Amino acid sequence: MQIVILDDAAQVAAYGANIFAKQLLKKPASVLGLATGSTPVALYQQLIEKNKAGDISFSQATTFNLDEYLGLTGEHPQSYRYFMNEQLFNHVDIDKQNTHVPPGDAVNPLIACTEYEQKITAAGGVDVQLLGIGRNGHIGFNEPSSGLTSRTRVKTLTKATIEDNARFFAEGEYQPHLSITMGIGTILEAKKVVLLATGASKADAVHAMVEGPLMAKCPASALQLHKDAVIIIDKAAASKLE
Ligand code: F6R
């Protein structure tokens, strides 16, 4: 693992955005693995600016998102498809046909999981996968106790994750407890993995991922096995590293 510790969240976003920009310049038809959540928003903003400035193009790129709530259509404002359209895809020159988010409205979610894996393989595999990390060490929706070789599948969310994400749902609104997520084995097959974490609330999870034992209790610790994993964190998220 390469650990990059920067002063603040803005620097983390800029560093991460540069990795993706360089990837697109090196290989315009890159396959990018993308994430949702609060952390990547500033990175996506920078990619939008670079695209508008003509520095990078997504016109030949293909994307695969990590996860999606099961039970929400892409039109639902809390779906990850909607998030990606709003935060990135609507603002860059990507062909939406080449953007993939697990289908939260799949008639048969089990078949949809297998098909998602097949699409990633058919695209040639993910070149660079963006990740955030949950306070409990999850990556994607691979919650603690997820198999370290797991593939794309339906996962139940933990109480901690449901509580963390409740802020995005209106009071009384239906909040899904199930998701479709790439597995840890799927994520580990990306050629490069870039994880961003900012803020003191992530310090314990970052410590467990980087310095703890490799264990299913901290899914992100599986990144210790990856030969090209870059962990980009601010000082607050790094505060519990030895
Ligand atoms: C989202 C995802 C999640 C988030 C994690 C951190 O696609 O895969 O694992 O990366 O929950 O979320 P934030 O960035 O909101 O703290």
Image: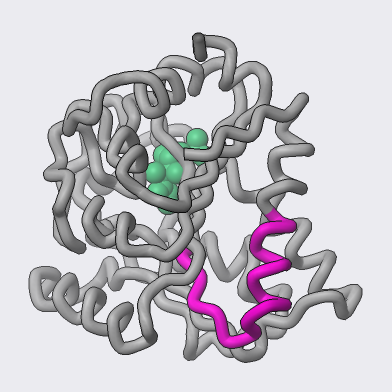
Magenta part of the protein: which range? Answer: 17-33
Which is nearer the eye, 43 or 215? 215
Which is nearer the eye, 50 or 163? 50
Determine if residue 115 is in view: yes
- Would residue 155 appear left or right of 18 to someone viewing this image? left
- Would residue 156 appear left or right of 186 to someone viewing this image? left
Tell me residue 13's x, y (percent): 71, 45
Tell me residue 99's x, y (percent): 48, 80
Q: Quadrant of residue 207?
A: top left
Quick check: 138 above or below 22?
above
Tell me residue 8's x, y (percent): 75, 28
Does residue 67 show up magenta in the picture?
A: no
Q: Residue at point 72% right, 77% down?
A: 25
Quick check: 6 above or below 79?
above
Quick check: 188 above or below 201?
below
Q: Residue at point 25% right, 44% down?
A: 142
Q: Quadrant of residue 28?
A: bottom right
Q: Residue at point 12% right, 44% down?
A: 147
Q: Residue at point 37% right, 84% down?
A: 124
Colouring scheme applied when the structure was drawn: one colour
Tell me residue 137's x, y (percent): 34, 30
